[in-house]
Amino acid sequence: MDTHRLTASRPKGRLRRTRDRLRRLALGRGRTLWHPAQFGVAAPTALTLVGTVLLMLPVAARSGRSDPSTALFTSASTVSLTGFAVVDTGTYWSPFGQAVLLLLMEVAGLGVMVFASLLGLLVMGRLGLRSRLTPWTDTTTINSQQIMVVIVGVVRIALAVQAAAWATLTARLWLRYDIPFGRAVYEGLFHAVSAFTNAGISLWPGDPIPYTDDPLILLPLAITLVVGGLGYPVLHEVFRSRGPQGWSLHTRLSLVVTAILLVLGPIAVIFTEWDNPDTLGALEPAHRALAGWFNAVSSRSAGFAGFDYGEAEPATRFTTIILMIIGVASGSTGGGLKVTTVAVLVLAVHAEARGRDDVEAFGRRISPATVRQALAIGMAATLVLAVATFALLEMTTLDLETALSETTAAFSTVGLSTGVVAQLPGAGQAVLVLLMYLGFVGPITLASIMALRHTRRSYTYPEARPIVG
Protein backbone atom coordinates (compact mmCIF):
# COMPACT_ATOMS: atom_id res chain seq x y z
CA MET A 1 0.00 0.00 0.00
CA ASP A 2 1.21 3.50 -0.89
CA THR A 3 1.23 5.24 2.50
CA HIS A 4 2.54 8.46 1.00
CA ARG A 5 -0.52 8.73 -1.24
CA LEU A 6 -2.87 8.12 1.72
CA THR A 7 -1.13 10.72 3.83
CA ALA A 8 -1.20 13.31 1.06
CA SER A 9 -4.91 12.78 0.44
CA ARG A 10 -6.02 13.52 3.98
CA PRO A 11 -5.81 17.35 3.80
CA LYS A 12 -7.80 17.24 0.56
CA GLY A 13 -10.43 15.12 2.29
CA ARG A 14 -10.75 17.59 5.14
CA LEU A 15 -10.97 20.48 2.70
CA ARG A 16 -13.65 18.65 0.73
CA ARG A 17 -15.69 17.98 3.89
CA THR A 18 -15.41 21.65 4.91
CA ARG A 19 -16.53 22.74 1.46
CA ASP A 20 -19.47 20.34 1.49
CA ARG A 21 -20.61 21.55 4.92
CA LEU A 22 -20.56 25.15 3.76
CA ARG A 23 -22.49 24.24 0.62
CA ARG A 24 -25.12 22.52 2.72
CA LEU A 25 -25.27 25.67 4.84
CA ALA A 26 -25.79 27.77 1.70
CA LEU A 27 -28.55 25.52 0.42
CA GLY A 28 -30.31 24.94 3.74
CA ARG A 29 -29.54 21.20 3.71
CA GLY A 30 -27.99 18.85 6.18
CA ARG A 31 -28.22 19.54 9.88
CA THR A 32 -29.03 23.22 9.50
CA LEU A 33 -32.05 24.76 7.80
CA TRP A 34 -30.50 28.20 7.48
CA HIS A 35 -30.43 29.60 3.97
CA PRO A 36 -28.33 32.79 3.64
CA ALA A 37 -31.50 34.67 2.73
CA GLN A 38 -33.15 33.47 5.94
CA PHE A 39 -30.19 34.64 7.98
CA GLY A 40 -30.18 37.97 6.14
CA VAL A 41 -33.77 38.51 7.25
CA ALA A 42 -33.58 37.05 10.76
CA ALA A 43 -30.42 38.81 11.94
CA PRO A 44 -31.62 42.43 11.36
CA THR A 45 -35.02 41.52 12.82
CA ALA A 46 -33.47 40.17 15.99
CA LEU A 47 -31.13 43.15 16.28
CA THR A 48 -34.05 45.55 15.81
CA LEU A 49 -36.04 43.85 18.58
CA VAL A 50 -33.05 43.93 20.94
CA GLY A 51 -32.54 47.61 20.19
CA THR A 52 -36.21 48.35 20.77
CA VAL A 53 -36.13 46.68 24.19
CA LEU A 54 -32.99 48.57 25.20
CA LEU A 55 -34.37 51.92 24.04
CA MET A 56 -37.56 51.32 26.05
CA LEU A 57 -35.59 51.09 29.29
CA PRO A 58 -36.10 54.11 31.59
CA VAL A 59 -32.38 54.86 31.48
CA ALA A 60 -32.38 55.22 27.67
CA ALA A 61 -34.42 58.45 27.44
CA ARG A 62 -33.68 61.67 29.31
CA SER A 63 -37.33 62.17 30.25
CA GLY A 64 -37.92 58.57 31.38
CA ARG A 65 -39.26 55.53 29.56
CA SER A 66 -39.67 55.96 25.81
CA ASP A 67 -42.94 54.90 24.20
CA PRO A 68 -42.81 51.66 22.18
CA SER A 69 -43.49 53.30 18.81
CA THR A 70 -40.60 55.76 19.19
CA ALA A 71 -38.26 53.02 20.37
CA LEU A 72 -39.24 50.68 17.53
CA PHE A 73 -38.98 53.32 14.83
CA THR A 74 -35.61 54.54 16.11
CA SER A 75 -34.24 51.02 16.44
CA ALA A 76 -35.43 50.02 12.95
CA SER A 77 -34.02 53.22 11.47
CA THR A 78 -30.67 52.65 13.16
CA VAL A 79 -30.32 48.94 12.37
CA SER A 80 -31.25 49.56 8.73
CA LEU A 81 -28.66 52.38 8.69
CA THR A 82 -31.31 54.81 7.46
CA GLY A 83 -31.14 57.60 10.00
CA PHE A 84 -34.79 58.68 10.01
CA ALA A 85 -35.61 60.29 13.34
CA VAL A 86 -38.92 61.09 15.01
CA VAL A 87 -37.13 62.73 17.95
CA ASP A 88 -33.94 64.76 18.28
CA THR A 89 -31.20 62.22 18.94
CA GLY A 90 -28.93 64.49 20.96
CA THR A 91 -31.58 65.78 23.36
CA TYR A 92 -34.17 62.99 23.58
CA TRP A 93 -31.89 60.02 24.22
CA SER A 94 -29.66 59.79 27.28
CA PRO A 95 -25.97 58.83 27.03
CA PHE A 96 -27.07 55.21 27.50
CA GLY A 97 -29.61 55.49 24.70
CA GLN A 98 -27.04 57.13 22.42
CA ALA A 99 -24.57 54.34 23.24
CA VAL A 100 -27.22 51.82 22.20
CA LEU A 101 -27.63 53.63 18.87
CA LEU A 102 -23.84 53.69 18.40
CA LEU A 103 -23.62 49.95 19.05
CA LEU A 104 -26.53 49.19 16.73
CA MET A 105 -24.92 51.18 13.92
CA GLU A 106 -21.57 49.45 14.31
CA VAL A 107 -22.97 45.94 14.54
CA ALA A 108 -25.37 46.46 11.62
CA GLY A 109 -22.72 48.11 9.46
CA LEU A 110 -20.08 45.45 10.01
CA GLY A 111 -22.71 42.73 9.77
CA VAL A 112 -24.02 43.76 6.38
CA MET A 113 -20.49 44.10 4.95
CA VAL A 114 -19.49 40.67 6.25
CA PHE A 115 -22.74 39.06 5.13
CA ALA A 116 -22.57 40.49 1.61
CA SER A 117 -18.96 39.41 1.24
CA LEU A 118 -19.52 35.90 2.61
CA LEU A 119 -22.55 35.53 0.39
CA GLY A 120 -20.20 35.74 -2.55
CA LEU A 121 -18.23 32.79 -1.22
CA LEU A 122 -21.40 30.76 -0.69
CA VAL A 123 -22.71 31.58 -4.16
CA MET A 124 -19.35 30.66 -5.62
CA GLY A 125 -19.46 27.26 -3.92
CA ARG A 126 -23.06 26.68 -5.06
CA LEU A 127 -22.37 27.44 -8.71
CA GLY A 128 -18.90 25.98 -8.87
CA LEU A 129 -17.67 29.14 -10.58
CA ARG A 130 -15.63 32.14 -9.65
CA SER A 131 -18.06 34.36 -7.80
CA ARG A 132 -19.05 37.69 -9.23
CA LEU A 133 -19.57 38.98 -5.71
CA THR A 134 -16.06 38.17 -4.53
CA PRO A 135 -13.80 39.45 -7.30
CA TRP A 136 -10.74 39.45 -5.04
CA THR A 137 -10.51 35.66 -4.77
CA ASP A 138 -8.79 33.41 -7.31
CA THR A 139 -10.07 30.07 -6.03
CA THR A 140 -13.13 28.02 -6.76
CA THR A 141 -13.53 26.36 -3.37
CA ILE A 142 -14.94 27.46 -0.06
CA ASN A 143 -13.09 26.97 3.19
CA SER A 144 -13.14 28.35 6.70
CA GLN A 145 -9.88 30.21 6.13
CA GLN A 146 -11.49 32.36 3.42
CA ILE A 147 -14.37 33.13 5.76
CA MET A 148 -12.01 34.30 8.48
CA VAL A 149 -10.04 36.36 5.97
CA VAL A 150 -13.23 38.17 4.95
CA ILE A 151 -14.35 38.78 8.54
CA VAL A 152 -10.95 40.01 9.70
CA GLY A 153 -10.53 42.11 6.57
CA VAL A 154 -13.90 43.85 7.01
CA VAL A 155 -13.19 44.61 10.67
CA ARG A 156 -9.69 45.90 10.00
CA ILE A 157 -10.73 48.23 7.19
CA ALA A 158 -13.77 49.50 9.09
CA LEU A 159 -11.85 50.22 12.27
CA ALA A 160 -8.98 51.88 10.40
CA VAL A 161 -11.25 54.24 8.45
CA GLN A 162 -13.38 55.05 11.49
CA ALA A 163 -10.31 55.68 13.64
CA ALA A 164 -8.92 58.18 11.12
CA ALA A 165 -12.24 60.03 10.94
CA TRP A 166 -12.61 59.89 14.72
CA ALA A 167 -9.20 61.49 15.30
CA THR A 168 -9.80 64.22 12.70
CA LEU A 169 -13.25 65.16 13.97
CA THR A 170 -12.17 65.08 17.61
CA ALA A 171 -9.22 67.39 16.97
CA ARG A 172 -11.35 69.84 15.00
CA LEU A 173 -14.19 69.98 17.52
CA TRP A 174 -11.80 70.40 20.42
CA LEU A 175 -9.35 72.90 18.96
CA ARG A 176 -11.64 74.99 16.77
CA TYR A 177 -14.92 75.07 18.71
CA ASP A 178 -13.59 74.82 22.30
CA ILE A 179 -15.73 71.76 23.01
CA PRO A 180 -14.45 69.92 26.11
CA PHE A 181 -12.03 67.17 25.15
CA GLY A 182 -14.18 64.33 26.51
CA ARG A 183 -17.24 65.59 24.68
CA ALA A 184 -15.23 66.12 21.48
CA VAL A 185 -13.95 62.53 21.68
CA TYR A 186 -17.49 61.23 22.13
CA GLU A 187 -19.01 63.29 19.31
CA GLY A 188 -16.11 62.46 17.02
CA LEU A 189 -16.56 58.73 17.62
CA PHE A 190 -20.33 58.81 17.16
CA HIS A 191 -20.21 60.70 13.88
CA ALA A 192 -17.27 58.69 12.52
CA VAL A 193 -19.25 55.48 13.01
CA SER A 194 -22.40 57.12 11.66
CA ALA A 195 -20.56 58.26 8.53
CA PHE A 196 -18.77 54.98 7.78
CA THR A 197 -21.94 52.93 8.25
CA ASN A 198 -23.85 55.48 6.13
CA ALA A 199 -26.45 55.76 8.90
CA GLY A 200 -26.41 59.56 8.92
CA ILE A 201 -27.52 59.82 12.57
CA SER A 202 -26.24 62.98 14.25
CA LEU A 203 -26.00 64.24 17.81
CA TRP A 204 -25.74 67.80 16.56
CA PRO A 205 -28.95 69.79 16.89
CA GLY A 206 -30.89 71.08 13.92
CA ASP A 207 -31.10 70.18 10.28
CA PRO A 208 -28.79 70.83 8.48
CA ILE A 209 -25.79 70.00 10.64
CA PRO A 210 -24.29 73.14 12.21
CA TYR A 211 -20.89 72.94 10.47
CA THR A 212 -21.83 73.48 6.82
CA ASP A 213 -19.15 76.17 6.47
CA ASP A 214 -16.31 74.09 7.92
CA PRO A 215 -14.42 71.93 5.38
CA LEU A 216 -12.48 70.17 8.13
CA ILE A 217 -15.77 68.78 9.43
CA LEU A 218 -17.58 68.11 6.15
CA LEU A 219 -14.65 66.63 4.22
CA PRO A 220 -13.77 63.92 6.80
CA LEU A 221 -17.44 62.98 7.02
CA ALA A 222 -17.80 62.88 3.23
CA ILE A 223 -14.63 60.85 2.67
CA THR A 224 -15.63 58.39 5.39
CA LEU A 225 -19.12 57.82 4.03
CA VAL A 226 -17.81 57.44 0.46
CA VAL A 227 -15.27 54.84 1.59
CA GLY A 228 -17.96 53.02 3.57
CA GLY A 229 -20.16 53.11 0.49
CA LEU A 230 -17.56 51.35 -1.68
CA GLY A 231 -17.74 48.08 0.24
CA TYR A 232 -15.16 45.53 1.29
CA PRO A 233 -14.73 43.74 -2.09
CA VAL A 234 -13.73 47.01 -3.78
CA LEU A 235 -11.56 48.28 -0.93
CA HIS A 236 -9.78 44.97 -0.56
CA GLU A 237 -9.00 44.78 -4.25
CA VAL A 238 -7.87 48.40 -4.52
CA PHE A 239 -5.56 48.11 -1.51
CA ARG A 240 -4.12 44.73 -2.54
CA SER A 241 -3.83 45.28 -6.28
CA ARG A 242 -0.76 46.86 -7.83
CA GLY A 243 -2.79 48.89 -10.29
CA PRO A 244 -6.07 49.29 -12.14
CA GLN A 245 -5.02 46.65 -14.67
CA GLY A 246 -5.60 44.02 -11.99
CA TRP A 247 -9.05 45.22 -10.95
CA SER A 248 -12.10 43.08 -11.58
CA LEU A 249 -15.13 44.24 -13.52
CA HIS A 250 -17.05 44.68 -10.26
CA THR A 251 -14.43 47.07 -8.89
CA ARG A 252 -14.11 49.00 -12.14
CA LEU A 253 -17.85 49.50 -12.49
CA SER A 254 -18.18 50.50 -8.82
CA LEU A 255 -15.39 53.08 -9.00
CA VAL A 256 -16.37 54.52 -12.38
CA VAL A 257 -20.06 54.97 -11.54
CA THR A 258 -19.21 56.32 -8.09
CA ALA A 259 -16.84 58.89 -9.63
CA ILE A 260 -19.48 59.96 -12.14
CA LEU A 261 -22.07 60.43 -9.39
CA LEU A 262 -19.61 62.36 -7.20
CA VAL A 263 -19.24 64.87 -10.05
CA LEU A 264 -22.64 65.09 -11.73
CA GLY A 265 -24.70 64.93 -8.52
CA PRO A 266 -23.07 67.95 -6.85
CA ILE A 267 -23.12 69.95 -10.11
CA ALA A 268 -26.88 69.48 -10.40
CA VAL A 269 -27.56 70.29 -6.74
CA ILE A 270 -25.32 73.36 -6.64
CA PHE A 271 -26.79 74.66 -9.91
CA THR A 272 -30.41 74.36 -8.75
CA GLU A 273 -29.85 75.62 -5.19
CA TRP A 274 -27.26 78.35 -5.73
CA ASP A 275 -29.71 81.26 -5.48
CA ASN A 276 -32.21 79.66 -3.09
CA PRO A 277 -32.14 81.87 0.04
CA ASP A 278 -33.56 79.06 2.17
CA THR A 279 -30.73 76.63 1.36
CA LEU A 280 -27.42 77.62 -0.25
CA GLY A 281 -28.25 81.20 -1.12
CA ALA A 282 -27.67 82.41 2.44
CA LEU A 283 -24.04 81.18 2.48
CA GLU A 284 -20.83 82.61 1.10
CA PRO A 285 -20.00 81.39 -2.44
CA ALA A 286 -17.25 79.01 -1.28
CA HIS A 287 -19.48 77.65 1.45
CA ARG A 288 -22.35 77.21 -1.03
CA ALA A 289 -20.21 74.94 -3.17
CA LEU A 290 -19.02 72.98 -0.14
CA ALA A 291 -22.48 72.50 1.38
CA GLY A 292 -24.03 71.63 -1.99
CA TRP A 293 -21.31 69.10 -2.76
CA PHE A 294 -21.62 67.54 0.69
CA ASN A 295 -25.41 67.27 0.43
CA ALA A 296 -25.22 65.57 -2.97
CA VAL A 297 -22.55 63.12 -1.77
CA SER A 298 -24.44 62.35 1.43
CA SER A 299 -27.78 61.92 -0.31
CA ARG A 300 -26.59 58.75 -2.06
CA SER A 301 -26.86 56.83 1.20
CA ALA A 302 -25.87 58.60 4.42
CA GLY A 303 -28.50 61.31 4.74
CA PHE A 304 -26.42 63.99 6.48
CA ALA A 305 -27.95 67.31 5.46
CA GLY A 306 -25.78 70.13 4.12
CA PHE A 307 -28.87 72.35 3.95
CA ASP A 308 -32.55 72.15 4.86
CA TYR A 309 -33.82 69.55 2.41
CA GLY A 310 -37.42 70.54 3.13
CA GLU A 311 -36.76 73.95 1.53
CA ALA A 312 -35.01 72.58 -1.56
CA GLU A 313 -36.18 73.26 -5.10
CA PRO A 314 -38.25 70.58 -6.89
CA ALA A 315 -35.39 69.95 -9.33
CA THR A 316 -33.05 69.33 -6.39
CA ARG A 317 -35.47 66.87 -4.85
CA PHE A 318 -35.77 65.08 -8.16
CA THR A 319 -31.98 64.85 -8.45
CA THR A 320 -31.75 63.61 -4.88
CA ILE A 321 -34.38 60.93 -5.48
CA ILE A 322 -32.34 59.62 -8.42
CA LEU A 323 -29.15 59.60 -6.32
CA MET A 324 -30.94 57.78 -3.50
CA ILE A 325 -32.34 55.14 -5.83
CA ILE A 326 -28.91 54.44 -7.36
CA GLY A 327 -27.23 54.25 -3.97
CA VAL A 328 -23.72 52.95 -3.40
CA ALA A 329 -21.68 49.83 -4.14
CA SER A 330 -22.60 46.22 -3.42
CA GLY A 331 -21.12 44.76 -0.26
CA SER A 332 -21.10 48.17 1.43
CA THR A 333 -22.98 49.70 4.34
CA GLY A 334 -25.26 51.76 2.10
CA GLY A 335 -28.53 51.12 0.32
CA GLY A 336 -30.20 51.76 -3.01
CA LEU A 337 -30.21 49.53 -6.08
CA LYS A 338 -26.40 49.64 -5.97
CA VAL A 339 -24.19 51.23 -8.61
CA THR A 340 -23.28 47.93 -10.27
CA THR A 341 -26.94 46.99 -10.67
CA VAL A 342 -27.67 50.30 -12.38
CA ALA A 343 -24.50 50.00 -14.47
CA VAL A 344 -25.53 46.55 -15.73
CA LEU A 345 -28.99 47.85 -16.66
CA VAL A 346 -27.52 50.82 -18.55
CA LEU A 347 -25.03 48.57 -20.33
CA ALA A 348 -27.84 46.19 -21.29
CA VAL A 349 -29.82 49.05 -22.85
CA HIS A 350 -26.68 50.21 -24.64
CA ALA A 351 -26.03 46.73 -26.04
CA GLU A 352 -29.64 46.37 -27.19
CA ALA A 353 -29.58 49.80 -28.83
CA ARG A 354 -26.50 48.78 -30.81
CA GLY A 355 -27.99 45.43 -31.77
CA ARG A 356 -25.49 43.33 -29.85
CA ASP A 357 -26.28 40.00 -28.24
CA ASP A 358 -23.74 40.37 -25.41
CA VAL A 359 -23.57 42.97 -22.66
CA GLU A 360 -19.96 44.04 -22.37
CA ALA A 361 -17.80 46.39 -20.33
CA PHE A 362 -14.03 46.87 -20.01
CA GLY A 363 -13.32 43.93 -22.28
CA ARG A 364 -15.52 41.54 -20.32
CA ARG A 365 -18.86 39.94 -21.16
CA ILE A 366 -21.53 40.16 -18.46
CA SER A 367 -23.48 36.94 -18.13
CA PRO A 368 -27.19 36.90 -19.08
CA ALA A 369 -27.97 35.63 -15.56
CA THR A 370 -26.46 38.79 -14.06
CA VAL A 371 -28.46 40.98 -16.43
CA ARG A 372 -31.67 39.16 -15.47
CA GLN A 373 -30.88 39.54 -11.77
CA ALA A 374 -30.28 43.27 -12.18
CA LEU A 375 -33.56 43.62 -14.08
CA ALA A 376 -35.45 41.64 -11.42
CA ILE A 377 -34.03 43.75 -8.58
CA GLY A 378 -34.84 46.97 -10.44
CA MET A 379 -38.42 45.93 -11.18
CA ALA A 380 -38.97 44.70 -7.61
CA ALA A 381 -37.70 48.00 -6.18
CA THR A 382 -39.94 49.98 -8.56
CA LEU A 383 -42.98 47.97 -7.50
CA VAL A 384 -42.21 48.37 -3.79
CA LEU A 385 -41.76 52.13 -4.11
CA ALA A 386 -44.95 52.49 -6.15
CA VAL A 387 -47.07 50.56 -3.64
CA ALA A 388 -45.55 52.32 -0.63
CA THR A 389 -45.98 55.78 -2.16
CA PHE A 390 -49.61 55.01 -2.98
CA ALA A 391 -50.20 53.81 0.59
CA LEU A 392 -48.58 56.93 2.07
CA LEU A 393 -50.67 59.19 -0.16
CA GLU A 394 -53.84 57.43 1.02
CA MET A 395 -52.89 57.66 4.70
CA THR A 396 -51.74 61.28 4.76
CA THR A 397 -52.25 64.65 3.11
CA LEU A 398 -48.76 64.68 1.60
CA ASP A 399 -48.30 65.71 -2.01
CA LEU A 400 -46.82 63.25 -4.51
CA GLU A 401 -43.37 64.83 -4.50
CA THR A 402 -43.01 64.70 -0.71
CA ALA A 403 -44.46 61.19 -0.41
CA LEU A 404 -42.15 59.84 -3.11
CA SER A 405 -39.17 61.54 -1.50
CA GLU A 406 -39.92 60.03 1.91
CA THR A 407 -40.53 56.52 0.61
CA THR A 408 -37.39 56.63 -1.52
CA ALA A 409 -35.33 57.87 1.42
CA ALA A 410 -36.66 55.00 3.53
CA PHE A 411 -36.25 52.24 0.94
CA SER A 412 -32.78 53.45 -0.07
CA THR A 413 -31.84 53.67 3.65
CA VAL A 414 -30.79 57.30 3.20
CA GLY A 415 -33.06 58.97 5.74
CA LEU A 416 -32.86 62.39 4.09
CA SER A 417 -36.27 63.68 5.08
CA THR A 418 -38.24 66.79 4.21
CA GLY A 419 -39.10 67.02 7.91
CA VAL A 420 -42.50 65.34 7.94
CA VAL A 421 -41.61 61.99 9.51
CA ALA A 422 -42.45 63.02 13.06
CA GLN A 423 -45.87 64.35 11.92
CA LEU A 424 -46.89 61.16 10.12
CA PRO A 425 -49.61 58.99 11.68
CA GLY A 426 -48.67 55.65 13.17
CA ALA A 427 -49.69 53.80 10.01
CA GLY A 428 -47.53 56.10 7.87
CA GLN A 429 -44.51 55.54 10.13
CA ALA A 430 -45.18 51.79 9.94
CA VAL A 431 -44.96 52.01 6.15
CA LEU A 432 -41.56 53.70 6.46
CA VAL A 433 -40.36 51.07 8.95
CA LEU A 434 -41.32 48.32 6.52
CA LEU A 435 -39.59 50.15 3.67
CA MET A 436 -36.40 50.60 5.71
CA TYR A 437 -36.43 46.90 6.50
CA LEU A 438 -37.03 45.90 2.87
CA GLY A 439 -34.41 48.33 1.61
CA PHE A 440 -31.82 47.02 4.05
CA VAL A 441 -32.31 43.28 3.54
CA GLY A 442 -34.31 43.12 0.31
CA PRO A 443 -31.81 43.62 -2.55
CA ILE A 444 -29.08 41.41 -1.11
CA THR A 445 -31.61 38.77 -0.04
CA LEU A 446 -33.25 38.74 -3.46
CA ALA A 447 -29.87 38.52 -5.16
CA SER A 448 -28.83 35.59 -2.95
CA ILE A 449 -32.07 33.72 -3.62
CA MET A 450 -31.76 34.13 -7.36
CA ALA A 451 -28.06 33.23 -7.42
CA LEU A 452 -28.31 30.18 -5.16
CA ARG A 453 -31.38 28.86 -6.97
CA HIS A 454 -29.77 29.19 -10.39
CA THR A 455 -30.42 25.96 -12.29
CA ARG A 456 -30.29 24.75 -15.88
CA ARG A 457 -33.16 22.76 -17.31
CA SER A 458 -32.62 19.93 -19.76
CA TYR A 459 -35.23 21.29 -22.14
CA THR A 460 -36.40 24.60 -23.65
CA TYR A 461 -39.70 25.76 -25.10
CA PRO A 462 -40.05 26.89 -28.72
CA GLU A 463 -38.97 30.48 -29.15
CA ALA A 464 -41.58 33.23 -29.59
CA ARG A 465 -41.21 36.98 -30.10
CA PRO A 466 -44.09 39.06 -28.70
CA ILE A 467 -44.27 42.66 -29.89
CA VAL A 468 -42.69 45.08 -27.42
CA GLY A 469 -42.45 48.83 -27.53
Image (cartoon, rainbow, N blue to C red):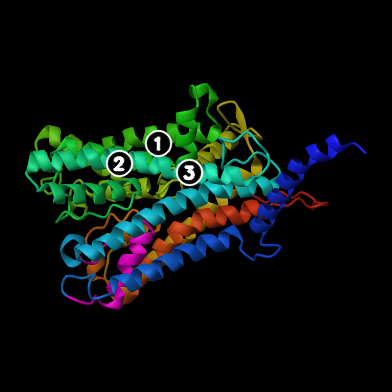
- Name the residue beneath numbered marker 1: 258
Q: Position of residue 103 (x, y in %)?
A: 33, 58
Find numbered disc 2 in the image and state the secondary structure of the residue it sits on.
helix
Q: Is residue 289 magenta?
A: no
Quick check: 28 above or below 179?
below
Question: Residues under labels 3 and 2: Cα distance?
Answer: 16 Å
Residue 49 placed where, x, y %?
A: 40, 71
- Residue 81 among magenta residues: yes
Mark 3 nearby-residue class (10 Å; few <14, some 14–19, many ≥20):
few
Picture disc at residue 163:
2
Identify which residue, 442 or 58, lies in the foreground: 58
Q: Which span is picked out in magenta?
A: 64-87
Counting from the top left corner in percent of width and height, residue 443 is at 50, 54
The residue carrying pointer 1 sits among few (fewer than 14), some (14 to 19) or many (20 or more) residues within 10 Å by Cα, namely many
Task: Decide: is 45 above or below 299.
Answer: below
Q: Which residue is painted at 62% across and 49% down in the image?
A: 122
Gap in Å between the C-alphas at discs 1 and 3?
26 Å
Q: 166 left or right of 258?
A: left
Depth check, front residue: 445 or 238:
238
Q: Dot 3 corresponds to which residue?
A: 152
